[in-house]
Amino acid sequence: MNSKTNSFFSFNNIKDSQKNFLIVLIIVLLPLLCFSNSLLGEFVYDDLVIVKDNPNLKHLSDIPKLFLQTYWGQNNNEGLYRPLTHVTFALNFAISGHDTYGYHLVNIFIHIINSFLIYWLSKNYCKNWYLALLCSLFFAVHPVHSEAVAAIYGRPELLATMFLLIAWAGYVNCIKSNWWYVLSLISYFLSLLCKESGIVFIGILLLVQACTERSWLARVKPTAKLLGYILATIPYLAIRVYVTKAFGVPKRGQFLGSEPFLTRLYTMSLGYIQYFRMLIWPDKLYTEYTYDVISRTTSISLTVGLSLLIIISLIIIGIWQINKKPALAYAILFFFVTTSIVSNIIIPTGVLIAERTIYFPAASICLLAALALYQLDKIGWQKLSIGLAVILLMLASVRTYYRNFDFQSNFTLFGSVLKLTQNHVKVTYAIATSYEEKGELLEAEKYYKEVLKTAPNYVQTYSALANLYAKQGFYDKALPLLHRAIELAPDSGNAYVPLARVYMQQKDYPKAIEAFQTAVNLIIPNAKLQHELALAYFYAEDLEKAELEMRKSIDLDPYFAEPQINLARILQKQNKPDQAQTLLDKALALAPNDPDAYTFYGVGLRMKANICGAKDYLLKALSINAQLPDAHYELGLIYAEMHLYKEARQEIETSLKLNSTNTEAKQKLLELNKTALNPEPAIKCPN
């Protein structure tokens, strides 16, 4: 892999320190400018589950727990174990909360580090700074990287690559000191804790060995140092299996897991051609690659045959060039080694193909492009080499910059996919849910119906559309859809949740409890679902079971304030104001602006005859949300006890305007009208 340093680009008139500074500056500034427009992007797609709505990231004291749960959260086993990635998200949250700017900045920073490490490693092996710089810059601005860098959920790729590259640099330097080898082993282990794909480092070192050693025996015989990485993998796999209860991705989470080997081979041959296309000509980037983009193929065809021929030919050319042009061989074979773990052929994964999964493998095409331009430079066509390099970098940078806009929001992301394919079921469904979140229910309904036209057995659409109708009070439309969803997937709990909510709206609490209980039995334990079940018991006036389910909700998520507030409400009804107040203190620490917490705190103080304190808490609740009928009613009771009958009537009348079904308020208003005939001196609270 050695070559002479080209004199035209040797910077003879510039000191080495200045030259190195300029190179670092270029490697930093180009990707920083290229991805700068991603800094204002919202949480999109998987960001919502992995980061925004993940309760396990909200408190730094919970960081140790992150090493004992899977990537998708506690009790959710999809076979992914990436605790170190979660730690970085937790640190992000501690600094900036839900402000996405900091998350995006960290992603860009890691990508810049990776670009620099690729420069250092390329220069170390090729001994030419120009070739190394080109490889690094092509990697820094490649459009396929937008998902990994511009989307927060792409961070596992960035982190795993960073620690892998550090491990690689340590491996290169271990001839200087054994401490470098120790650093390399540690960094490799950290790479595995960021994402499973870090394991390809062993294959990379074997490939380096094959392309640098002279004899075939030396090329294929594992070295003692290589065995060290294999041994370091064993404890990782043991921890991973212990936490995830699976060696790989469980069958239910595999995209091609139920398919026979040949179907996986034929389908992924088309997937690899798609990879080649997006690396060479990234005009169409779908983000979500399903059978809508790459056809499930069960038999050999001309297209599949040609795809397999191209793939096999590239592998043969790579092996053939090991003796003649090791750098070229390495560049070709690197892609196949680094994508082996996500190929779906031997080990099925949870995705068909994805842009983010070839973040690191994309270095292959970058090195190939750099080698081609370096050859032009080497034969004396320096100006052409530089000119083509500048043009390619400009085109890639512009494409990447505009691609980043797709990740600004869920609408821009899913909309970009629908522009490329109108029949993408999963994306159409996602667009519908995005409209629903924005409150544009008619648009949401339209897209849900589009999904059902294209895929009438897409079960979750029935539940989602029913939920949409239930929000608008169209229960007669919602119920048939929910029953259809249950008919299609009786073992799925997703339809039972909106079904229970419909029954709650209809005040049919026994049926709501039954539906919620079924959902709880079928769905992975969930604090919010447990809380809804508890509320159903509460409204059914079964306080004992309501308390039990509310405590289960708190156990599942101690930082979820709502069940603590509602458990306090239950305890107040059981005449336990002291226990209720303790819970409300915790709830207010978690949610200092929750009006319900202030309302029930006021109720508790009234129960303890502290009417002045109760008044203050109720006024605070109404200052946050003036549309709380219970707070107005309770404040009316306080004013009545203070003999402020005019104010009491005003508050209770306001309560009845907001909730005309409150019979207690109606009765109290009649009592006030009688009491006002014999007024007593008003009670004043101290200032």
Image (cartoon, grey):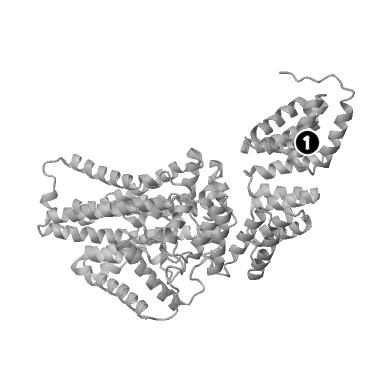
Residue 49: image x %, image y %? 54, 52
* Observer-nearest of 615 and 138: 615
* Observer-nearest of 509 and 92: 509
* Observer-nearest of 83 and 447: 447
In this image, 92 relative to 498: left or right? Answer: left
* Observer-nearest of 272 and 665: 665
Mark 1: give few (<14), some (14-19) or many (20+) Cα within 10 Å.
many
Q: Is residue 56 above or below residue 358?
A: above
Q: Is residue 163 visible?
A: no
Q: Residue visible at 39% across and 50% down?
A: 405
Q: Is residue 186 above or below residue 518?
A: above
Residue 224: image x %, image y %? 33, 61
Determine which quarter of the picture holds residue 265.
Answer: bottom left
In this image, 471 relative to 238: left or right? Answer: right
User: Number of labelled discs?
Assistant: 1
Residue 439: image x %, image y %? 57, 50
Q: Is residue 438 above or below residue 493?
A: above
Q: Quadrant of the N terminus?
A: bottom left
Q: Is residue 305 visible?
A: yes
Residue 571: image x %, image y %? 77, 41
In this image, 31 relative to 11: left or right? Answer: right
Residue under label 1: 577
In this image, 373 relative to 288: left or right? Answer: left
Determine which quarter of the picture holds residue 678.
Answer: top right
Q: Determine the secondary structure under disc 1.
A: helix
Q: Quadrant of the C terminus?
A: top right
For the residue marked with disc 1, what is the amino acid?
Pro
